[in-house]
């Protein structure tokens, strides 16, 4: 990136403002809705709101600019995600709606002043505006979490957006990714978080990966074939979970006679067959793959399919190249409130011809979340390191609810294998036979 300091400041300010417009849209609800806990899996929206402001104050006003706290310091611990699990947050003496809105506005006003004046070098935290980029990403990540809260809430629809694009493109079922080394992770993305670093070579044997994410129609075939009643397809812990929780289909699916519907942000709609399936947990993705005679891709396989350019041997920033995403490349940034049909973003395909790796749905991989060789926690252990080895599975690629400023092909998300309130889908893979690998 060749940006002068003024251009960098301008871009950081624009990203901060865009994130805040989205936060305002997601919290433009009456005070009762803002304070209500819509699901025990989620915080009340008012917690996310003040937590966004509190993290911004801690990093950009107190650390970067050396300012004093704006509120009594006892407030900080209320918004410390490690001290209070989501289910307990409604019982905390949280700031009410009006003081929360006032607090985040006050922090932001001061941050924009700091951004105008502070040198963006001299400290690792400030290099390339990293601390500001981290706060932009933090706000956008909470915005995606708040979007998931909107999907969980009962009652009439509050959000609207045009439908995601349809497609009738006929694509091959799977794509061969040739075996060999490729560079995974990054040393050069200025806003990459510690878990995406360092860049390192990985040997990946030849494999096939689905050209697109698994669709509602594909997944429905598994449901209707009795997939949820047959322990052969399930990981033993997944089978226990599916029986214990009474799962019978992806979250938000309902059946009326022979037809299936899906609840999407307060509206109930017939299933769109060619849309990428969303709201499945890792166990459901894993079971589907086994039923289909396939498996989930590893994280390294996913990243190679997304980034490897066979002509140059280089790893790209995005499947389509190094340019930032545009609306033609991928379904990102809450422009739509649902995944698109598969094949709807041909301009976003990878060098090897794999579609929709970025956007639409987070894609479960078979890999557990861990540090890359040479991992170094930065700027704080709680960002990633404390989650390593905790049984979390990695998701890749972002969803329709992920903002481009919080996503790269190296970006790693992680969650418990039972979680499905996130915008999670998947694609499947299989290892190539020696004959197939040498065509
Ligand atoms: Fe947070």
Image (tube, rainbow, N blue to C red):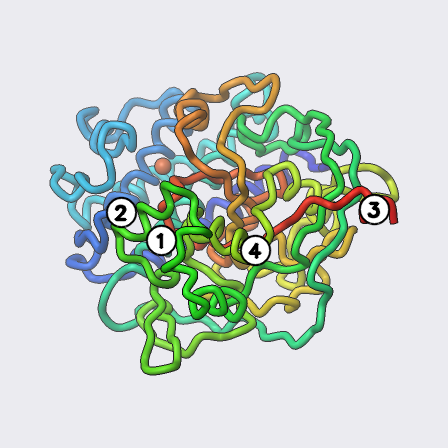
Q: Of marks 3 and 2, which one's residue comes earlier in the chain? A: 2
Which secondary structure, mark 2?
loop
Q: Is residue 234 above or below residue 278?
A: above
Q: Are discs 2 and 1 less than 8 Å apart at CB?
A: yes
> From mark 2 to mark 1, how far is it between C-alphas?
8 Å
The residue beneath circle 4 is: 359
The numbered dot on residue 435 is: 3
Comparing 233 with 151, the one in front is 233
> Residue 364: percent from the left, percent from the top?
51, 47
Q: Ligand 1 closer than 8 Å to the CB at disc 3? A: no
Residue 384 pos. (x, y %) = 45, 27
Residue 400 vertical placement versus 256 (above, below) = above
In three-dimensional space, the C-alpha distance between marks 2 and 4, rounded to whole angstroms, equals: 23 Å
Mark 2 crowdedness (10 Å alpha carbons): few <14, some 14-19, many ≥20: some
Front-most of residues 50 and 419: 419
- Near mark 4 (Cα within 10 A), the count class, few <14, some 14-19 or many ≥20, is many
**Given contact means CB atoms under 8 Å apart, are the residues at marks 4 and 1 in contact?**
no
Q: Earlier in the sequence, mark 2 or mark 4?
A: 2
Query: Where is residue 375 shown, x and y percent of the image?
Result: 56, 19
Disc 2: which residue: 41
């Amino acid at each position: 990136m060749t940006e002068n300091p003024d251009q960098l400041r301008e871009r950081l300010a624009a990203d901060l403002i865009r994130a805040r417009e989205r936060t305002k849209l997601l919290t433009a609800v009456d005070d009762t809705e803002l304070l209500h806990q819509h699901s025990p899996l989620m915080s009340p929206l008012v917690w996310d709101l003040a937590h966004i402001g509190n993290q911004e104050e801690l990093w950009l006003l107190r650390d970067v600019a050396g300012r004093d706290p704006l509120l009594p310091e006892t407030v900080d611990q209320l918004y410390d995600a490690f001290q209070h699990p989501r289910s307990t947050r409604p019982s905390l003496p949280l700031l009410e709606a009006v003081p929360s809105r006032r607090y985040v506005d006050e922090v932001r006003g001061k941050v924009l002043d700091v951004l105008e004046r502070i040198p963006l070098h001299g400290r690792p935290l400030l290099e390339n505006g990293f601390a500001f980029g981290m706060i932009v990403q933090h706000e956008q990540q909470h915005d995606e979490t708040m979007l998931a809260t909107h999907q969980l809430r009962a009652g009439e629809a509050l959000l609207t957006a045009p439908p995601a694009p349809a497609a009738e493109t006929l694509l091959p079922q799977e794509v061969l990714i040739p075996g060999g080394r490729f560079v995974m992770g990054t040393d050069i993305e200025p806003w990459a978080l510690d878990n995406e670093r360092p860049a390192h070579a990985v040997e990946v044997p030849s494999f096939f990966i689905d050209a697109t994410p698994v669709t509602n129609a594909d997944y429905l075939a598994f449901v209707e074939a009795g997939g949820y009643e047959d322990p052969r397809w399930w990981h033993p812990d997944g089978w226990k979970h599916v029986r214990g929780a009474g799962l019978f289909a992806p979250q938000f699916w309902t059946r009326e006679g022979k037809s299936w519907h899906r609840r999407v942000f307060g509206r109930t709609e017939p299933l769109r067959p060619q849309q990428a399936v969303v709201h499945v947990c890792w166990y459901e993705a894993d079971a589907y793959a086994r039923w289909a005679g396939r498996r989930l891709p590893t994280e390294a396989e996913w990243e190679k399919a997304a980034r490897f350019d066979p002509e140059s041997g280089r790893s790209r920033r995005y499947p389509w190249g190094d340019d930032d995403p545009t609306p033609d490349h991928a379904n990102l940034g809450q422009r739509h409130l649902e995944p698109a049909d598969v094949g709807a973003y041909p301009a976003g395909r990878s060098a090897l011809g794999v579609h929709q790796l970025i956007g639409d749905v987070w894609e479960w991989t078979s890999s557990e979340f861990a540090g890359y060789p040479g991992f170094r926690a930065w700027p704080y252990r709680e960002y990633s390191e404390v989650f390593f080895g905790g049984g979390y599975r990695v998701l890749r690629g972002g969803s329709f609810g992920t903002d481009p400023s919080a996503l790269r092909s190296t970006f790693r998300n992680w969650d418990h294998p039972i979680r499905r309130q996130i915008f999670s889908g998947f694609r499947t893979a299989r290892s190539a036979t020696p004959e197939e690998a040498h065509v």
